Amino acid sequence: MIDLRSDTVTRPTPAMREAMANAVVGDDQYGEDPTVRELELLAAGLLGKEDAVFVASGTMGNLVSLLTHCGRGDEVIMGDECHIFWYESGGAAALGGMPFNLLPNSRNGEMDLGRVRQAIRVTRPGYPRTGAICVENTQNRCGGTVLSLEYLAELSAIARDSGVPVHMDGARIFNAAAAIDTPAEEIARHADSIQFCLTKGLAAPVGSMVVGSADFISRARASRKIVGGAMRQSGVIAAAGIVALRDMIDRLPDDHRRARLLATGLAAIDGVSIDLNAVQSNIVIFQTEPAKVHVDFIAAMKAGGVLVSNYGTKGVRMVTHYEIDDTAIERALDVAATVLAGRLVAA
């Protein structure tokens, strides 16, 4: 079965399994797990920040970050296509009492900077305080698009002038860096805090990182405790994260190349509508012809040995990762062409 549903389906590499088996561990709550600390310092260094904290998931990382930046009732500005709004169960609102101020994301994932400036609250009775501005990079629901450094610099300046922190959901920040051929540190410098996942293109089995200033991370550790994210001998899983950061970043352009092969191949199939300009990293989102219900297409693809994701009104999503090679791309395209020609249907 060729699994293109997400890069979260990746399994740990042999090097990761060996590192996990041999990890030196201690009680992380006492600050005594050397492997966790090694991972945290490695993550902070790669993004040019002072410190980092290991968390169980990207959703937890975003939640911990917002709980640290904001108080109850503080408003969070974010795009209407962002992961925090769509896929994180409203955690910041449910647990932190934070209302979301949603601004439209353009097709390339940007929020209009003029609207961002206007959305930042002035001090006035009855107004909530603007607690944070959130951006996502790469922008999942926009097709894995990458925010430019120029855009991030302007956004950061607007936020800084108003004394509002910027949090980046950088679940795939290393994909963003690979796509624009620049160090991830250059992207991260425009945010006060960044969450990134070890479990997507980097292929670790568990965990995400939150990075920021030493003071912010100190407070984030308390926020992590509040949401039950404190761990003990977590060096067992942190060891895989170290391998991910050392071994898996440089190969991400291979995933991007294969996503481009997939996208151009799909564009040549009758019944597929796709914006090739949006395919900038390892995510491919497309529509099938209106007469072909997405759920039927997805079921037929599965019958042909290819797993893909139903993205609702967005269409169908396919994501490349290290377990997908060129042969898998060719096979997926053959199955898609067969399905859309009506020669393969779900059992």
Image (tube, grey):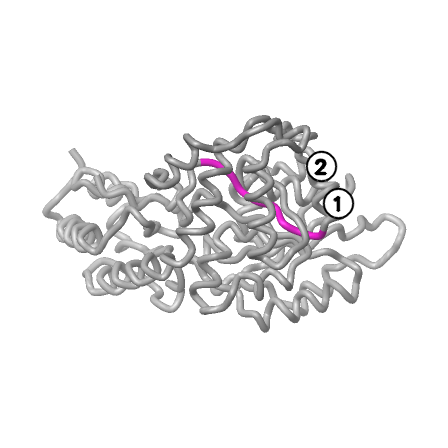
Tell me whether circle 1 and circle 2 mark residues in contact (CB < 8 Å): yes
What residue does disc 2 label? Answer: 96
Instruction: Say which residue appears at 62% left-offset and 30% top-offset.
Output: 28
Tell me where residue 168 sits by quadrant.
Answer: bottom right
- Dot 1 amino acid type: Cys
Which residue sits at x=53%, y=47%?
Answer: 83
CA neighbours of label 2 inside 10 A, class few (<14), some (14 to 19), many (20+): some
Which residue lies at the image location 33% right of the left edge and 50% below the top edge? 321
| Picture quadrant of residue 253 | bottom left
Whole-percent x, y for residue 72 in the image: 77, 39
The residue tagged 1 is: 70
Q: Residue furthest bottom?
A: 150
Which of the pair 87/249 is nearer the observer?
249
Residue 308 lies within the magenta run: no
Q: Which residue is at the front of the view, 221 or 238?
A: 238
Magenta residues, dominant SS class: strand
Packing grade of label 1 (10 A; few <14, some 14-19, many >=20) is many
Which quarter of the rendered picture does the N terminus lie within?
top left
Q: Quadrant of the C terminus?
A: top left
| Above or below, 88 relative to 340 | above
The amino acid at mark 2 is: Gly
Question: Left of 52 or right of it: where is 294?
Answer: left
Range of magenta residues? 206-213
